[in-house]
Image: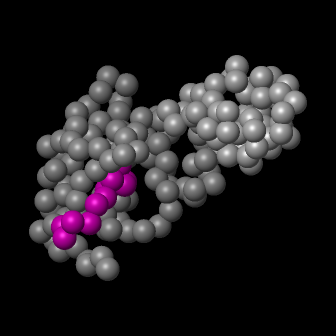
Amino acid sequence: MRRQPTEQMIQGLRERLQLKSRRMPNGCIEWTGHTNRGGYGDTTLGYGNHVTAHRAAYAFANGLSPAFYGGVIRHTCDNKLCMNPEHLILGTHAENERDKIERGLVLKGEQQKEAKLTDEIVRSIRLDPRPNREIAQTYGVSKSAIQRIKGGDGWKHVG
């Protein structure tokens, strides 16, 4: 369970945000410290409670506690390291996902580092007359992945 941060913890976080940031020519204020797996600035708010740098910066700029839980903090600049409050807006997960799609930030198919297939392989799967189970074994993917590809629900971007 998260404990409420003390004034000392909050002041320490404010100081870290200032010390571990740099102003960029494009107006972004980038976090220079540790990042999480998603590529966002990562720090702590006492007791090991992690908080992203942009979330803390947004909270401070808007008179909120850095431990607030509400909503998603969206970047208008698409820079995950940016913590400039002028580049941050509060929104929902759905709005954030829509932003990513509209700005072309969603990786598709072989652009994803975990992808086992390529666009070329997907084209050949669509033409492959063998049973889906057999095709799946050939490429090391699930039978349902092959069904989605052949049914038009998977890899839609591949013509």
**Which residue appears at 62% of the width and 38% of the height?**
140
**Displayed quadrant of residue 119:** top right
Marks counted in the figure total 0
Residue 148 % position (x, y): 78, 43
**In which quadrant is the C terminus drawn?**
top right
In this rendered view, identify the residue nearer to me: 63 or 93.
93
Residue at (64% x, 25% y) in the render: 118
Image spot of residue 68 (x, y percent): 38, 68
Q: Nearer the viewer, residue 142 or 51?
A: 142
Q: Say left or right for 101 vs 53.
A: right
- In the rendered image, residue 49 lying in the magenta stretch gets the answer yes
Q: Which of the 4 quarters of the picture holds residue 22?
A: top left
In the image, taking residue 41 as reference, residue 143 lies left or right, namely right
Depth check, front residue: 108 or 94: 108
Q: Is residue 16 magenta?
A: no
| Vertical comparison of 12 with 101: above or below | below
Quadrant (top left, top right, bottom left, bottom right) of the N terminus: bottom left
Can residue 129 be seen here? The reply is yes
Q: Residue furthest top?
A: 120
> Is residue 40 depicted above or below 104 in this figure?
below
- Side of 148 where 19 appears, left or right: left
- Let me know if residue 61 appears in the view: no
Q: In the rendered view, how is the structure colored?
A: one colour
Q: Nearer the viewer, residue 150 or 61?
A: 150
**In screen coordinates, is 144 left or right of 72?**
right
Relative to 99, residue 66 above or below: below
Tell me which segment is drawn in magenta.
Answer: 46-58
Q: Position of residue 150 (x, y in %)?
A: 83, 37
Residue that appears at 60% across and 28% down: 110
Q: Residue at x 35, y 30 (%)?
A: 27
